[in-house]
């Protein structure tokens, strides 16, 4: 491992702008604490952050190429002040182009979008984890075909970035069934899936790749993810590492089991 090699993460990004709203029940406190802990866990400050968001779907993969990416307030029904949140981290057009080139070298479709902004799957958790907004951020989309093996391959293609000081972050949710949040009937199924998912993540890389490709066959898999766009960023983060992952965060949030993972 080089001095500048960064790990990869799969983080939960919460619900909309949840970390910046009144939270008297403390539903989001533990998750926010996990996000805040990330910088101190790194051996070196990242030169840039590449965030894969479950809120941007494209044909093939795409990267934000703006030097000053705007924010995309892609949530609805929240207090007015949450549409005035700012996260003025610079973009990194060079990293966007480099990432797309790496993907194409693996035979994957990849483009750079010079106008796309950072959606809430990026700016909300990054504002918590890296509030100074002084590290360049590039957002990466998920492929709309939702193929887990394709996203694992994307991670393998991007792995060299880790030795260039780039922190790769998959931003989604380990449980993402909107009907389940706050419903105690989903507690046991979500815990069954969470236990399976953690076991898969902590396996050696070949077994992990095979297990994650078949996630829908896991206990309560499809119940936990009626649509898998919020799980696919995990495939990218895992694919960029050949080491077993570790569960860095685990909590029951709104009656459902939620986890976050790190890969070295």
Image (spheres, rainbow, N blue to C red):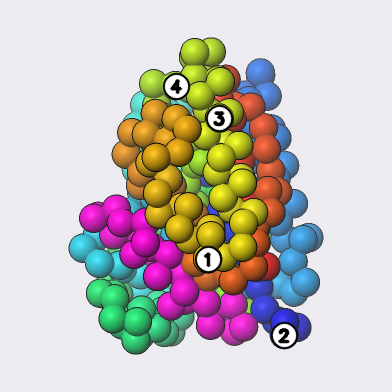
Which residue is drawn at the image coordinates 58% and 70% (left, top)? Answer: 241
Identify residue for label 1. Answer: 206
What number is the disc on residue 2? Answer: 2
Q: Residues within 10 Å of mark 1 (few under 14, many from 20)?
A: few
- Cα–Cα gap, marks 1 and 2: 23 Å
Disc nearer the start of the sequence (4/2)? 2
Q: Secondary structure at mark 4?
A: loop
What number is the disc on residue 192? Answer: 3
Which residue is drawn at the image coordinates 44% and 21% (left, top)? Answer: 180
- Cα–Cα gap, marks 3 and 4: 14 Å
Q: Quadrant of the N terminus?
A: bottom right
Disc nearer the start of the sequence (3/2)? 2
Coordinates of residue 12 in the picture (x, y in percent): 55, 44
Disc nearer the start of the sequence (3/4)? 4
- Cα–Cα gap, marks 1 and 3: 22 Å
Q: Magenta span has 21?
A: no
- Cα–Cα gap, marks 4 and 2: 42 Å
Q: Secondary structure at mark 2?
A: loop
Q: Residues within 10 Å of mark 2 (few under 14, many from 20)?
A: few
Q: Which residues are magenta?
A: 137-164
Of 102 and 45, the residue lying toward us: 102
**Residue 97 in sight from this viewpoint:** no
Disc nearer the start of the sequence (1/3)? 3
Identify residue for label 4. Answer: 180
Position of 20 with respect to 248 (left or right) is: left
Coordinates of residue 224 in the picture (x, y in percent): 43, 32
Disc nearer the start of the sequence (1/2)? 2
Mark 3 touches mark 4? (CB < 8 Å): no
């Amino acid at each position: 491992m080089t001095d500048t090699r960064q790990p990869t993460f799969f983080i939960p990004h919460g619900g909309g702008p949840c970390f910046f709203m009144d939270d008297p029940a403390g539903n989001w406190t533990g998750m926010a604490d996990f996000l805040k802990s990330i910088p101190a866990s790194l051996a070196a400050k990242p030169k840039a952050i590449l965030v894969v968001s479950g809120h941007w779907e494209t044909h093939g993969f795409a990267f934000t190429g703006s030097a000053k990416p705007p924010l995309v307030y892609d949530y609805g029904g929240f207090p007015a002040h949450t549409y005035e949140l700012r996260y003025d981290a610079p973009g990194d057009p060079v990293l966007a182009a480099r990432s797309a080139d790496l993907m194409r070298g693996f035979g994957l479709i990849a483009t750079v979008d010079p106008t796309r902004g950072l959606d809430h799957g990026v700016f909300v958790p990054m504002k918590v984890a890296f509030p100074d907004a002084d590290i360049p951020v590039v957002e990466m989309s998920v492929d709309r075909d939702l193929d887990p093996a394709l996203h694992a391959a994307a991670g393998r293609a991007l792995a060299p970035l880790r030795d260039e000081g780039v922190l790769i972050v998959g931003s989604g949710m380990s449980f993402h069934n909107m009907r389940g949040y706050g419903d105690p009937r989903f507690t046991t199924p979500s815990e069954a899936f969470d236990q399976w998912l953690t076991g898969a993540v902590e396996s050696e890389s070949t077994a992990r790749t095979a297990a994650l490709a078949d996630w829908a066959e896991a206990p309560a898999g499809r119940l936990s993810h009626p649509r898998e766009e919020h799980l696919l960023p995990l495939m990218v983060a895992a694919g960029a590492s050949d080491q077993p992952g570790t569960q860095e965060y685990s909590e029951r949030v709104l009656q459902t089991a939620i986890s976050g993972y790190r890969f070295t």
